Amino acid sequence: GQQLNQSPQSMFIQEGEDVSMNCTSSSIFNTWLWYKQDPGEGPVLLIALYKAGELTSNGRLTAQFGITRKDSFLNISASIPSDVGIYFCAGQGEGQGNLIFGKGTKLSVKP
Amino acid sequence: DSGVTQTPKHLITATGQRVTLRCSPRSGDLSVYWYQQSLDQGLQFLIQYYNGEERAKGNILERFSAQQFPDLHSELNLSSLELGDSALYFCASSVGYKNIQYFGAGTRLSVL
């Protein structure tokens, strides 16, 4: 099925560092969502974006909806050990209810 | 806690068998979505129900079926199971025009 290109696939960083990950698509999306998944759990919504150019923050997390509507990025500032997990981007097309997911960015944080 | 409840958490079965996964959406949510998560394919949309009616279909195999009941809970039925059906199966629910989807904790299916 259709998927988004999410990069990087994995990151191994030091506590306190900033993190950036992004997703690109060949299709235009009306909505971009960022989720985090911990082992043995379902994805948990972090940030939802609804308009091209929109920049939204949730604590140390900031995400933007790309102007072309084909991309989005997520930044995490001053990472902490509990940021460890897999981060997924998801897009929703016009008139569609289902989400299309990227393959995830696995984040590891070294204390 | 997302408010979406999935049972069972783990399921181990043999090839050729049939299983039923259950999902209770968040209170008030009319839409239920089923997704499959495998290591090589990531999260893939299977099917959506809205207020009891099938709304959209993704890459769902013919051996799989789902339904949503009047109390809005949903069941995903997987039959003639194959080794490749081993995966995490997630249910999500949503309400409203913004369609933010909240996910359950998933059912881990192992087909031996």
Image: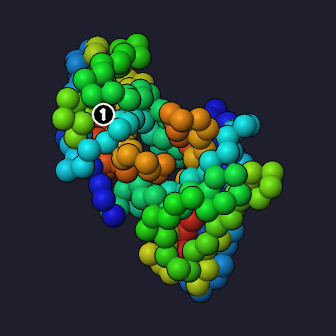
Q: How are the colours assigned in the image?
A: rainbow
In the rendered view of the protein, which quadrant contains the C terminus of chain B? Answer: bottom right
> What is the total number of numbered labels drawn onto the structure image?
1
Q: Residue at x 57, y 65 (%)?
A: B109
Residue A87 seen anywhere in this rendered image of the structure: no
Tell me if residue B76 comes above or below residue B102 in the rendering.
Answer: below
As drawn, the residue found furthest toward the front would be A95
Tell me if residue B46 comes above or below residue A41 in the rendering.
Answer: below
Quarter of the image where one finds residue A50: top left
Residue B80: x, y in percent? Answer: 58, 84
Q: Residue at x 30, y 21 (%)?
A: A54
In the rendered view of the protein, which quadrant contains the N terminus of chain B? Answer: top right
Q: Residue at x 37, y 50 (%)?
A: A100
Depth check, front residue: A59 or A111: A59
Residue A88: x, y in percent? Answer: 36, 41
The chain that hosts pointer 1 is A
Residue A49: x, y in percent? Answer: 37, 28
Quarter of the image where one finds residue A67: top left
Pointer 1 local density, CA inside 10 Å: few below 14, some 14–19, many at least 20 = many
Three-letter code, disc 1: Ser
Depth check, front residue: A60 or B93: B93
As drawn, the residue found furthest toward the right would be B71
Judging by the rendered image, the residue that carries numbered circle 1 is A108
Which element carries disc 1, helix, strand or loop?
strand
Residue A25 seen anywhere in this rendered image of the structure: yes
Residue B38: x, y in percent? Answer: 41, 61
